[in-house]
Image (cartoon, grey):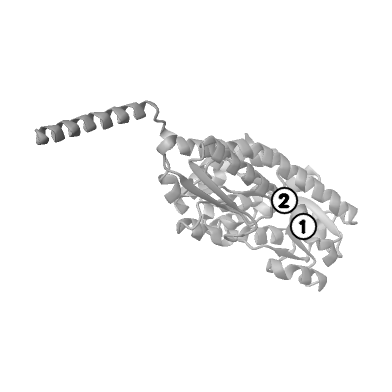
């Protein structure tokens, strides 16, 4: 009888546990026991920068839309990595997301150099977006994904135009550039473009540039209005700007392949959707930021000269004479250049 009572008790217990589990399943939701994923985002820009503000909005959107299943940690001001080092950090799984500038990527993905070609010199913002948000942009993003083992969640963020800034020499037209020594941030296309205009490109590290300007080791440099404002380069002698739209700088969103492959499909959709929601606002903010910086430069006495569309088109053709050599040296797929030409023509 004792054995029977014990058996009977165990049977009743088993039935009870089964009933409890069955009841619990009625109230089960996927989020109640879903895995949490850590998404660390790295940026070298400061909190006030337009890119940083956009990434903050993105981080908030991802956490909200995922019901906390994605835990986002956003590190700005190079708290984790400088952009020049972040690609290797992504590959090693030391960070899950980064948004480096286009100028950081062509050494890893040579086809990125297509946007630095003279073909794009002096183009409008609308033309840049038409190509970069279109079929060519999709193909470049696909090649970035393939070459770096990452995911590109969508369109790229804007920084804006780089122009030519000078200390003592006021440049009002392209002919005034002859024999001027101009600092370039590096890159074959930058140097070739400057040479095509008759100037002499010189590579100087950014930390050394203010002193180089003060010592007049260079007559000018390629950079953006915002960069001149943030570094207060009028204190180093910058007095003039020639707004010739040397190139159009952007930031490329990269998500580490290891993290991306480990996400379920619904969270992948959350990330792509959240990214798309911030792009248009960031681009508007970037334009506003560059315009505000331009006003600041003018208030500091920097004189502004802007070549007209005809002059830009004329000198674009002159610079394009060097384009085949640039394409070969950088290692750009010539078919991408043809595709870019066709998309610009349309």
**Residue 170 figure quarter:** bottom right
Which residue is at the front of the view, 179 or 62? 62
Q: CA distance from mark 2 to mark 1?
A: 11 Å
Which residue is at the front of the view, 69 or 122? 69
Instruction: Tell which circle, 2 or 1, labels the residue nearer the N-terminal end.
Output: 2
- Residue that mark 1 sits on: 230
Residue 281 placed where, x, y %? 68, 38
- Residue that mark 2 sits on: 48
Q: Quadrant of the C terminus?
A: top right
Q: Is residue 306 left or right of residue 195?
A: right
Residue 19 placed where, x, y %? 28, 27
**Residue 157 figure quarter:** top right
Q: Quadrant of the N terminus?
A: top left
At x 85%, y 65%, the residue is 235
Whether residues under marks 2 and 1 lie with C-beta atoms below 8 angstroms apart, the answer is no
Q: Is residue 170 left or right of residue 39?
A: right
Residue 88 placed where, x, y %? 49, 60
> Of discs 2 and 1, which sits in the foreground?
2
Residue 214 placed where, x, y %? 82, 71
The crowd level at tag 1 (other Cα within 10 Å; few <14, some 14-19, many 20+) is few
Q: Secondary structure at mark 1?
A: helix
Can residue 341 be spotted in the picture?
A: no
At x 77%, y 57%, the residue is 230
């Amino acid at each position: 009888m004792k054995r029977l009572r014990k058996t009977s008790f165990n049977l009743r217990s088993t039935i009870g546990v089964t009933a409890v589990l069955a009841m619990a399943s009625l109230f089960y939701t996927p989020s109640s026991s879903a895995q949490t994923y850590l998404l660390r985002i790295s940026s070298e820009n400061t909190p006030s920068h337009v890119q940083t503000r956009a990434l903050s909005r993105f981080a908030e959107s991802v956490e909200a839309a995922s019901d906390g299943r994605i835990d986002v940690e956003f590190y700005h001001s190079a708290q984790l990595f400088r952009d020049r080092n972040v690609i290797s950090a992504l590959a090693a799984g030391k960070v899950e997301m980064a948004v480096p500038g286009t100028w950081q990527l062509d050494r890893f993905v040579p086809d990125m150099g297509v946007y630095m070609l003279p073909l794009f010199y002096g183009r409008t913002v609308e033309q840049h977006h038409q190509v970069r948000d279109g079929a060519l942009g999709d193909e470049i993003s696909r090649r970035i994904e393939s070459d770096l083992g990452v995911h590109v969640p969508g369109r790229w963020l804007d920084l804006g135009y780089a122009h030519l800034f000078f200390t003592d020499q006021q440049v009002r037209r392209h002919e005034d550039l002859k024999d001027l020594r101009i600092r370039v941030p590096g890159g074959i296309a930058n140097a070739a473009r400057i040479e095509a205009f008759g100037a002499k490109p010189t590579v100087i590290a950014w930390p050394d540039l203010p002193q180089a300007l003060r010592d007049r080791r260079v007559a000018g440099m390629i950079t953006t209005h915002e960069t001149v404002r943030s570094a207060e380069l009028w204190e180093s002698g910058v007095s003039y700007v020639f707004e010739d739209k040397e190139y159009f700088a952007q930031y490329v969103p990269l998500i580490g392949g290891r993290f991306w492959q480990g996400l379920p499909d619904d969270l992948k959709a959350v990330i792509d959707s959240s990214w798309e929601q911030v792009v248009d606002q960031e681009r508007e903010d970037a334009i506003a930021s560059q315009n505000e910086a331009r006003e600041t430069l003018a208030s500091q006495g920097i004189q502004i000269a802007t070549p007209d569309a005809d002059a830009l088109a004329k000198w674009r053709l002159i610079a394009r004479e060097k384009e085949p050599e640039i394409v070969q040296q950088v290692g750009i797929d010539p078919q991408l250049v043809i595709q870019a030409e066709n998309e610009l023509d349309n």
